[in-house]
Amino acid sequence: MSDLVVIAFPSEAKAEEVRQKLLDMQKDYLIELGDAVIAVKQPNGKVKLNQLFHPSAAGAVSGTFWGMLIGWLFLMPIAGAALGAASGALGGAMTDLGIDNKFMKDIGQTLQSGNAALFLLIRKLTADKVLADLKGVGGTVLRTSFDHTKEEALRQALAGAQAASAEAKPTASG
C-alpha cells in the first residue's frame, strides 16, 4: 500500500530541489516513489502540473513501434506507425497511473500565486534515513496518509533548519 504526502513550498524551484533529492534517495534504495508531481499556482490562478512520467507520450512511443512492426507485415509501415502512435497516445491518456490530476489541481488552487506543492506517492520508505536527509529543507505539510507519529516526524524534519539555527544563536550575556 502506498502513502500520499503533499508538501507546500514557496517556489517551484524549491519543490524541484526537494523532488530531485528524493529521486537521488530512490537511486540509493532509501525510498520507492510511485509518483512525484509538482503543482504550481500560476499568476493567472491556473494550476500547472509538472509530472515526471507522461502516460500519453509513453503510449505514443510504444504504439508507434508496434504499429510500424505490424505495418511492415501488411506493407504499410507509415500508416501502421501513425495508427499505432494515435492508439498508444489515447491508451496512455486513459491510463492515469499515480496521483489523480483533479485532486492535485484542487489542492493547487489553495496555494498562493507562485507557490508550489510537491505530491509524493510513496511505496516504500526507510523513514529514519529519509527524514535525516530531508532535515531542514523547509516546506509545510498539507496532507499525508501517514499516522500521526510519522506525520509529526516529517513536520519536525522539514523544519529542522529553523530549530537548529534558533538553538545555535548566541545569547547576550554580560
Image (spheres, rainbow, N blue to C red):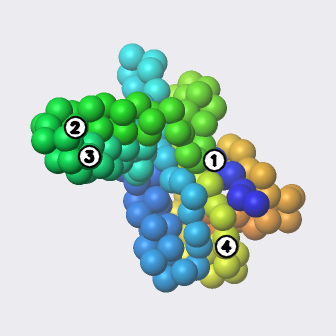
Q: Distance between the Cα atoms at labels 1 and 3?
A: 43 Å
Q: Is residue 157 visible?
A: yes
Closer mark to the observer between disc 1 and disc 2: 2
Check disc 2 and give the amino acid type.
Answer: Gly
Marks 3 and 2: CB-CB under 8 Å? yes
Q: Distance between the Cα atoms at labels 3 and 4?
A: 42 Å
Q: Residue at x 58, y 47 (%)?
A: 98
Give the class, few, some or many, for how many residues have Cα within 10 Å of label 3's Cα (few <14, many ≥20). some
Give the class, few, some or many, for how many residues have Cα within 10 Å of label 4's Cα (few <14, many ≥20). some
Q: Residue at x 50, y 73 (%)?
A: 26
Q: Distance between the Cα atoms at labels 1 and 2?
A: 42 Å
Closer mark to the observer between disc 3 and disc 4: 3
- In primary-sequence order, the first of circles 1 and 2 is 1
Which residue is under mark 1? 6
Mark 4: secondary structure: strand
Q: Position of residue 80 (x, y in %)?
A: 22, 37
Q: Is residue 68 left or right of residue 104?
A: left
Number of the label disc, if any, that sits on residue 80: 2
Mark 3: secondary structure: helix
Check disc 4 and give the amino acid type.
Answer: Leu
Marks 4 and 1: CB-CB under 8 Å? no
Q: Nearer the viewer, residue 46 or 115?
A: 46
Which residue is under mark 4? 125
Number of the label disc, if any, that sits on residue 70: 3
Q: Is residue 104 visible?
A: no
Mark 1: secondary structure: strand
- In primary-sequence order, the first of circles 4 and 2 is 2
- In primary-sequence order, the first of circles 1 and 3 is 1
The relative height of residue 169 versus residue 106 in the rendered view (above or below) is below
Residue most extreme to the top: 44
Give the class, few, some or many, for how many residues have Cα within 10 Å of label 2's Cα (few <14, many ≥20). many
Query: Looking at the rendering, which quadrant does residue 2 occupy?
Result: bottom right
